[in-house]
Image (cartoon, coloured by chain):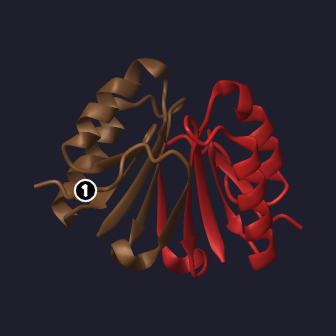
Chain colours: A brown, B red
Amino acid sequence: MYCLIVYDVDVCKVSKINKFLKQYMNWIQNSVFEGELSNSDYVKVKKSLKSMIDKDNDSILIFKFRNKYSFDKETIGTERSPVTNIV
Amino acid sequence: MYCLIVYDVDVCKVSKINKFLKQYMNWIQNSVFEGELSNSDYVKVKKSLKSMIDKDNDSILIFKFRNKYSFDKETIGTERSPVTNIV
């Protein structure tokens, strides 16, 4: 499935979560990642994120799409990082 | 159309953009809004956002969907603000 992950966590966890998600997805903006995830990677990512955050104070949103063509995307201002394929 | 807007702007503009978007959409997380926009509101929102930011340093992403059922959403951790209908 194609996913978009947006996180709002305590500043001390930002770098750790960023590094973790970079292994699976494309960083597209401050605290925003998108990319294709296999079902097993999706489960792994969710489980790891759960273990990294404080569930009472941090918040992570995961949007799931059938594929990358399920939405149109527009950028206003500067493009932080265009999506590339992770090989 | 149904939209998701994620912004990463200089801290001095955050509150202004937040207040502006609240008139049209639902705030769901720090710097993230979602909601249904008519075509005319979509044009208005885009134009206003463009005028508010510094296009070389700020970044706003707009994801557009056919409707709110075009994706599944999951929250890990705390729910900042559940989506409600703006009447």
User: Is residue B10 positioned above or below B78 on the image?
Assistant: above
The quarter of the image holding the C terminus of chain A is bottom left
Q: Is residue A11 left or right of residue A18?
A: right
User: Is residue A21 positioned above or below A40 on the image?
Assistant: above
Kindly tell me whether residue B25 is visible in this rendering. Answer: no
Q: Is residue B8 left or right of residue B23?
A: left
- Residue lying at the far bottom in this picture: please name it: B66
Q: Which residue sits at x=33%, y=75%?
A: A67
Q: Position of residue A47 (x, y in %)?
A: 27, 45
Q: Of residues A72 and B30, which is closer to you in this image? A: A72
Q: Of residues A8 and B7, which is closer to you in this image? A: B7
User: Is residue A61 positioned above or below A19 on the image?
Assistant: below
Kindly tell me whether residue B42 is visible in this rendering. Answer: yes
User: Is residue A55 positioned above or below B87 on the image?
Assistant: above
Residue topped by disc 1 = A84
Q: Of residues A41 and B1, which is closer to you in this image? A: B1
Q: Quadrant of residue B10?
A: top right
Chain for disc number 1: A
Near mark 1 (Cα within 10 A), the count class, few <14, some 14-19 or many ≥20, is few
Q: Quadrant of residue A1?
A: bottom left
- Amino acid at dot 1: Thr
Q: Is residue A79 left or right of residue A3?
A: right
In the structure shown, which secondary structural element does the residue marked by tag 1 occupy?
Answer: loop
Q: Which residue sits at x=51%, y=45%?
A: A78
Q: Position of residue B43 (x, y in %)?
A: 75, 69
Q: Which residue sits at x=80%, y=69%?
A: B41
